[in-house]
Amino acid sequence: MKASTLRIGLFGIGLDAYWPQFAGLKERLEGHLATVARKLARPGVAVVNLGLVDNPERASDAGREFRQEDVDLIFLHVTTYALSSTVLPVVRRAKVPVIVLNVAPTRAIDYAAFNRLGDRTAMTGQWLAHCSACPVPEIANVFKRAGIPFHQVTGVLDDDPECWREVDGWVDAARVVAAMGRNRLGLMGHPYGGMLDIQSDATLQGVTFGTHIEHLEVDELSGLRRGISDAALAERAEEFREAFDVQPDCAWQDLAEAARTSVALDQLVARHRLGSIAYYYKGSGVPENDATVASIILGCSLLSARGVPVAGEYEVKNVQAMKIMDLLGVGGSFTEFYAMDFNDDVVLMGHDGPGHIAIAQARTKVRPLAVYHGKVGRGLSVEMAVRHGAVTLLSVVEGGDGALALLCAEAESVAGPILEIGNTNSRYRFGCGAREFVQRWCSHGPAHHCAVGVGHVAGTIEKIGRLLGIETIRVC
């Protein structure tokens, strides 16, 4: 799926009555706004800067312009005092999330220099250039009464890393939300029978995230496999040897079958413009389909590493979590509780099937399995541990109230023995302890799967939830 540009709307505010009263004030504030625009600019982001909005008429026009420009998010830079009637029309018409950016031009006014000015008109103009906090309560009051969700960042224009990290977090969150709204999720097969927790309302996924769901058949993938040339098969098998640590006991026939399916998967993704996939095939006595799904793991692992996360067991909610993590650039590997190690106070977590090999601690091993536990077939599987260091877990939870929520926790992936059974599995240590983590996590009723990514990104996940208007729960 091609990455699309995030479109950020930006405007500053002021009061047109000030401009003839205080020479140079407008130009000074426009300079502050230009600084904000430069700080927001980055690859993959288009900043639509409408300048200073200083009266209700201009505000109405600005709202229309933002709609015409199809912005995903608005930053309202509070440059000085302005009437709330100058702000409300912009946001009401634009109908996208708004971040109130309350940043002062300096850490503090130079009081001695200010009081030496002597000219009280000049002094008032100087103060107005620093009074960004003044109208924030008024703006917040009107947004609250209008039912408009808003978010705030408070700080200093320059030399304030904490402030601009917060801004960067909102930009990252907005990028994820926008990309989720454009994502095409392929669902192939049906849920694993009896796993009531993974059942999901597909319409709710589209309503909440904007995701388009494309329903696929295993037969289509099997049909594509028939057309794979020997040359393409050999090339993909060689690619496997470069991407994976293929163990000596892996048979060539199994590797060839996996290569054939991998090339066919790439064609399926391209044909339907997919950005993620969830699949499960129980097996219905069609040998060709059995062979297709039994050889799918390596190809799905490659896809996951290339930005098309793949979840087994038709886990719709969890592939959404995996996609969010992937869009944050931290991976998003399919996982579940494996066991608890009370001696080392860690939780072992992993899963059979595809793994996100881009976040592996070392080269991912490919091992032959005589049986896929609880599933049809045999063949090659991947074994990896998630990179040691900071990690974040994420689950998309569907509650009894018919709403989705985000559940997350931060932890550390730590060294130690893992289960060498041809699955992905890792050891995770939680700040609250393994026992407390499991109890807190399960108390919120998630499905038994979740996504794991590298780095601590719970703060950005919380922002994603706020932009989507859904609850975010952080347990650790």
Image (cartoon, rainbow, N blue to C red):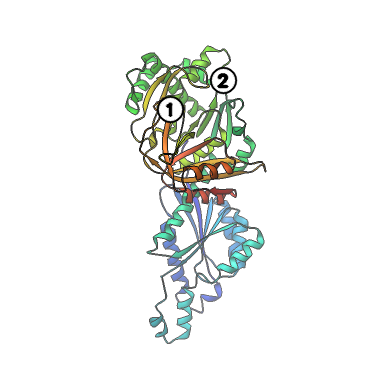
**Disc 2 element:** loop
Amino acid type indicated by mark 2 = Lys
**Disc 1 element:** loop
Residue under label 1: 423
Front residue of 221 and 400: 400
Amino acid type indicated by mark 1 = Asn
- The answer for how far apart the CA atoms under marks 1 and 2 are is 19 Å
* Disc number lying in front (1 or 2): 1
Q: Position of residue 109 (x, y in %)?
A: 42, 76
- The quadrant holding residue 247 is top left
139 with respect to 118 (left or right): right
State whether residue 214 appears in this view.
yes
- The quadrant holding residue 316 is top right
Residue found at x 39% / y 78%: 110
Residue under label 2: 282
Choose the circle earlier in sequence order: 1 or 2: 2
Is residue 135 positioned above or below 408 on the image?
below
Q: How many marks?
A: 2
